[in-house]
Image (spheres, rainbow, N blue to C red):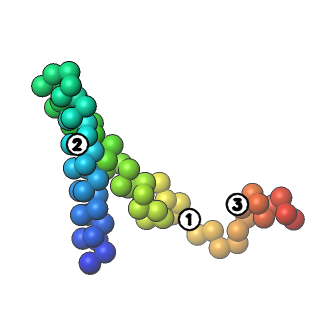
Amino acid sequence: MGSRIRNSLSRAKYAAVGAAVGAAVGGLWSRNAASTGGALGGLAGATLSELKSGAGGVFADKEDDADGDDDPEADAAA
């Protein structure tokens, strides 16, 4: 349970930093660009957090690879 809370807080932190950076960059142009930049920055930050989370992330391979057949280095060495 504690790790789920930690992961959620980490995701929120990355999203908040991304939104702040996006809003700051967009604010150089206009209010509308600041709003759009904040939204896109938040999305980018949350996506980065998911990718950073490692094996439990969105793009994690759910199949068990116990036999190691998909390892190209092992195939080259054999």
23 relative to 62, above or below? above
| Residue occupying image coordinates x 28% and y 62% | 10
The Cα–Cα distance between marks 1 and 2, rounded to whole angstroms, is 34 Å
The Cα–Cα distance between marks 2 and 3, rounded to whole angstroms, is 38 Å
Q: Label 1 belongs to which residue?
A: 63
Q: Which label sits on residue 70? A: 3
Rendering coords of residue 56 (x, y %): 43, 65
Q: Secondary structure at mark 3?
A: loop
Rendering coords of residue 28 (x, y %): 21, 25
Of mark 3 and mark 1, the one earlier in the sequence is 1
Q: Which amino acid is tagged 2?
A: Ala
Quadrant of the rendered image containing residue 33: top left
Considering every residue shown, the one lying at the far left of the view is: 31
Of mark 2 and mark 3, the one earlier in the sequence is 2
9 left or right of 57 in image: left
Q: Label 2 belongs to which residue?
A: 19
Rendering coords of residue 7 (x, y %): 30, 66
Of tags 3 and 1, the one toward the viewer is: 3
The Cα–Cα distance between marks 3 and 1, rounded to whole angstroms, is 11 Å
12 relative to 1, above or below? above
Q: Secondary structure at mark 1?
A: loop
Rendering coords of residue 66 (x, y %): 65, 73
Which quarter shows the N terminus? bottom left
